[in-house]
Amino acid sequence: MMPLIRHGIPNRGPHAAILLLFLLIVACRPDAGEGAERRGEESLRIAAMAPAAVEIIDALGELDLVVAVGDYVEWPPAVKNLPAIGAYNTPNIEQILNLGVELFVTVRSEAGGTVHGRLRDLGVEVLELPLDTFDGTLEAIGILGQALGAETRARALRSEIGERMDLLRSRIDGIAARRVMVVVGTDPLYVAGPGSHFDEIMRAVGGVNIFHDALGTYQMVSLEAAIERRPEVIIDVSDNRAGSPRGQLEGVWARWPFMPAVREKRVYQVDPVRLTIPGPRLPEMAELMAKMIHPEVFGAVPDGDLGPMDRHVP
């Protein structure tokens, strides 16, 4: 692995650590009868731990089934008043049972094996979703569609995502790719590597991941390596503190004005909710990244599109 430098970029605080933990571990509205036909007179009670899982369930038109969420779930606004039942691998089992949860939806993780096994022993079905890659997210949409009896809506959602991504790809024919670094954590420096949804998206919109050869989906690297690879675009989603500056801003990267991304003013400070939760919003994420990587093709990023979401993205 590349040499690690633990200084030079200041720590963004505990919220940045929470974001990194999450990374390491459009909407098709319902046909009137599809969910009802599946459930009959029953009403499945779901606890959804992953933000992406909740967004998928919402896109499938089944958000009313969710009775509890994980601590890091904040979107869509309709879930804000639901009970929060803990972190991914440390859910409150007593609370889950008291809420009558029948289906526990989480991310696929070896670390969660023990608690997932205990939930199964207690009669709670556990659904582990592969939400760590672009293709895995599409697979997760299909898995949830099948589990919720919403296969038709899931197929339509996956088809729409594919069509919109293909449309973006068609617009970069003949365009020289730009070297991109997506920063997901600082102190130490973590970047998006191969297999991440960031990696797939940037390739679709004319970017080249400067850490395409990293050892993991999200990789700790040295600051030296980042500087040596001379990114032409830096997309920094490492800071999710409320009120943090958002926009076309160099931030801490201004310390290295010789970096192409800094010199050409292609450094973007982005609220992580915009780009870090793969799910139904994958095309919106791709469109946003396209504007940051190739504004001459896709247009400039509109004011406000790099900050927190205050409305549901259609």
Image: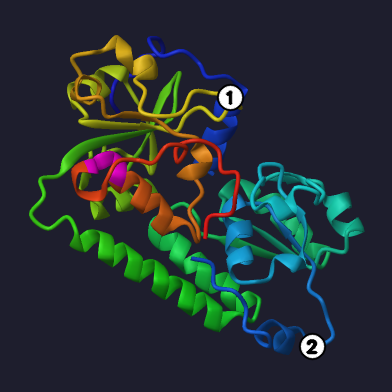
- Relative side of 119 to 57, left or right: right
- Relative side of 200 to 185, left or right: left
Say which amino acid is labelled 1.
Gly
State yes or no: residue 292 in magenta. yes
Overall secondary structure of the magenta section? helix
- Judge whether residue 185 can be spotted in this image: yes
Q: Mark 2 to mark 1: distance in Å?
A: 46 Å
Residue for point 71% across, 48% down: 70
**Residue 142, percent from left and from top:** 51, 73
**Chain-order first, disc 2 or disc 1:** 2
What residue is disc 1 on? 243
**Residue 305, percent from left and from top:** 45, 41
- Furthest residue to the right? 98
Specify start and end residues of the magenta stretch as a single range. Answer: 291-295
What residue is disc 2 on? 40
Residue 267 sits above or below residue 23 on the image: above
Along the viewing direction, whichever of 298 and 253 lies nearer the viewer:
298
Q: Secondary structure at mark 1?
A: loop
